Amino acid sequence: QTMRFFAGSSQLSSSPSYPSTGGLDGYSSGSSLLAWTAISLSQRRLRFAPRSSAVRNSRPSFVLNAVAHPDYDNSASVATTSIQSTTSSSSSSLLSDWNPLEKDIHNWLTSSSNILLSDATRPPSNEEIKTLQKAFALFYGSDRNVEEAVNLLTKSIESWEATNQGGDETAGLYRVRGDAYMELTQPKLAAGDYSKSIELLDGPDGNKADPEEKPASRLGHGRAIRSLGMAATKEEAKSASIDYAVYFSLVSRLDDDNDKEAGAMFSEAIIDGIQRNPYAAWEWGMVNRVAGDYDAAAEVHRLAAKAFEEIGDKPRAVISAMDQGIDLAAGLGESNDSKDNGAKLTMAKKIL
């Protein structure tokens, strides 16, 4: 009988001195030994595929904290790439001699629904890595071919998903392909990729991603929707507005605890983010206009004008201020408050 166990990238030795890291879903480590003894008694042979050291420790091949049993010889090499299982004809007779705990453990372990193995999980092959490198070279390099880069990125995404690579890595590939789609003026395809990236980054692997990926994906999705102009639906524009808000919160130098000054529409953190990127702030105002939120659009454009003024970009400061006036005028019919409408009209006239 041969058994090799790998947790993440670490092989579990058959030596009794190997430290136990846990038990079997609620059982003690002693019960884990009993579990593997139960398999031994049934003369069941299990072969777990070896995992390369390049595979992440955070994704073990199986959900059990396997405790190595000294009866097994770990020295033999395992060539198979998936779990192989055979049970001798005598196992049924042996099963009748087991106590209830042994039977329960045997049934639990031999149920395919309880052993979660992924025989597809493996590091990317050299060929797959070369494909990705070529895609990056075609997109970011001097000899650019964005269309071919998209084709190769699509192959890389398929490979990364088929081999269950980390969600953080796959999210990055979707984000880069989204950037490529934007260069090819295909914003709807780009928006789909950015959405997938955001979904993966909000998942369990998101905390392992580069800190720049979340704001980049959020801004990318917002910009993809903004580029649709008035062709975007109000629902799409509202979704993009959320993307911009999250982006500014993420790039802010302040913790976003939603603290607001009296009468302020946005948190201090978001305002700080706007000051760091007034170009994106102007875009956010335009998205809010498409969404029909003219008050938010006017306030964002006011903040953008102020930020452009601070960095000495007078032309864009004037343009943002004019957009603020347009937003105020467009929102006059949105309120039944005559005093509020009067103040907006006065401000609009003053700006325009």
Image (cartoon, rainbow, N blue to C red):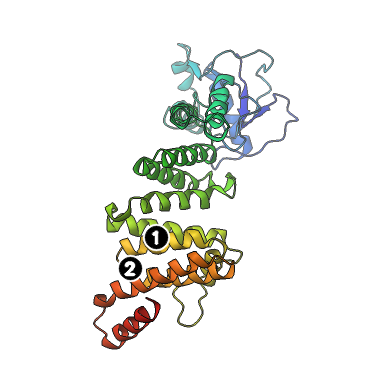
Q: Which x, y percent locates residue 52?
A: 63, 24
The quadrant holding residue 51 is top right
Of 92 and 12, which appears nearest the observer? 12
Of mark 1 and mark 2, the one earlier in the sequence is 1
Image position of 325 (left or right of 153): left
Image position of 147 (left or right of 269): left
Callout 1 crowding tier (Cα within 10 Å): few <14, some 14–19, many ≥20 = many
Amino acid on which the number 1 mark rests in the picture: Ser
Which residue position holds label 2? 293
Image position of 67 (left or right of 122): right
- The label shown at residue 10 is none
Which residue position holds label 1? 241
Of 179 and 79, which appears nearest the observer? 179
Numbered disc 1: secondary structure: helix
Residue lying at the far bottom of the rendered structure: 339
Q: Quadrant of the C terminus?
A: bottom left
Give the distance between the C-alpha atoms of the residues marked 1 and 2, in whole angstroms. Answer: 10 Å
* 299 in relation to 208, above or below: below
Numbered disc 2: secondary structure: loop
* 253 in relation to 194, above or below: below
Dots 1 and 2: beta carbons under 8 Å?
A: yes
Amino acid on which the number 2 mark rests in the picture: Asp
Of 22 and 10, which appears nearest the observer? 10
Q: Which x, y percent locates residue 116?
A: 48, 31
Q: Quadrant of the N terminus?
A: top right
Callout 2 crowding tier (Cα within 10 Å): few <14, some 14–19, many ≥20 = many
Image position of 30 (left or right of 174): right
